[in-house]
Structure formats: C-alpha cells, structure tokens
Amino acid sequence: MYDLFAMVIALLLPTIVVHAPRAELTLEVARTEAQREHGLMYRTAIPPHTGMIFIFERDAPVKFWMKNTLVPLDMIFIGPDGTVRQIFSNVPVVNQTLPNSDIPREGGVAKWVIELRAGEAVQDGLARGVKLDLRGVPSPQ
C-alpha cells in the first residue's frame, strides 16, 4: 500500500534537475504547505540522485521530522544564494508508534531544503559552503 501511495504522490509533483558537484539530482518539487508537510513520507526506497526540494517563501528557521518516513535521509539546508549551510546526514527512521511530541526534529535557517537518501549528500559532493545554482527552482505557492 505504501509503495502505491508514494508512486501516486510522486507522479503529481513536478521535478527539476539540480547540478551537484558530482551528480545531477532529480528532485520532486514541494512548493505548497501540504506538499512540504507530506514530503517523502511512506517511500520504501529512494533511487540514487533523486529526492525532494522544499521551497519556502523566505529564508527563515525551518524544522523537519521523520514522521512516517520509512528510509533514512540526508537533509541539506540551503540559503537564498544557493550556499549549503548545514547538512544533517543519515537522519534515522523513527518508530511509527512514537508519539509526535517525541519525534526528533532537525532544523536550521533555509530558503530551500533538499532531502536525499542517506549517504547521498557526501557521495554527490554536497558539503557546507558548496554553492548550487537554484535559479530554475519555482517559487512557493
């Protein structure tokens, strides 16, 4: 059931390609609050060099959690000039019975956040201070 649900969501979201230092990343675009809230929930796998970019109205503090996320992730927090500010690597899956108040959150200041499967950020050459060209990223809705 999770795989079918995740496939339907993935088909509904547009994708963009972002050039990382060692890979081209195909990213689903989460522009609305509902899309950002759902994120990569219920995915049982994330192919190499794919993930999601979360687009926010402005550069501001944001928090992410792993509720209903079934695969470990890398979370890349990016400033308005495209510079990687912070990376949370290998953020683990949490037990689905854990109460919402107990689910750990990762946060930082960002205009964009990219989520990739765990270990992908380093493999693709993403590190603090790397600048990405995000000029083609659409605006939030």
Image (tube, grey):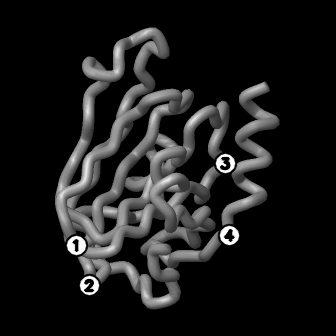
- Residue wearing tag 2: 81
Q: Residues within 10 Å of mark 2 (few under 14, many from 20)?
A: few
Q: Counting residues from the N terminus, which is met first, the one under dot 2 or under dot 3?
A: 3
| Front label number (4 vs 2) | 4
Inter-mark Cα distance, 4 to 2:
22 Å
Residue type pointed to by label 2: Asp
Are there few (<14), some (14-19), or many (20+) residues within 10 Å of tag 4? Answer: few
71 over 29 or under it: above or below: above
The span from disc 1 to disc 2 (Cα, nearest Å) is: 10 Å
Name the amino acid type tagged 4: Pro
Instruction: Give the numbered dot on residue 59.
Output: 1
> Contact, CB < 8 Å: mark 2 with mark 3?
no
Amino acid type, callout 1: Asp
How far is mark 4 from mark 1, CA to CA? 22 Å
Q: Please give the residue where the numbered disc 4 appears in the rendered image.
A: 14
Left or right placement of residue 125 versus residue 85 in this view: right
Kindly identify which numbered label has been placed on residue 47.
3
**Label 4 – label 3 distance at C-alpha:** 17 Å
Q: Secondary structure at mark 2?
A: loop
Rounded to the nearest angstrom, the CA distance separating label 2 from label 3 is 27 Å
Element on which disc 1 rests: strand
Given contact means CB atoms under 8 Å apart, are the residues at marks 4 and 2 in contact?
Answer: no
Q: Callout 3, which amino acid? A: Pro
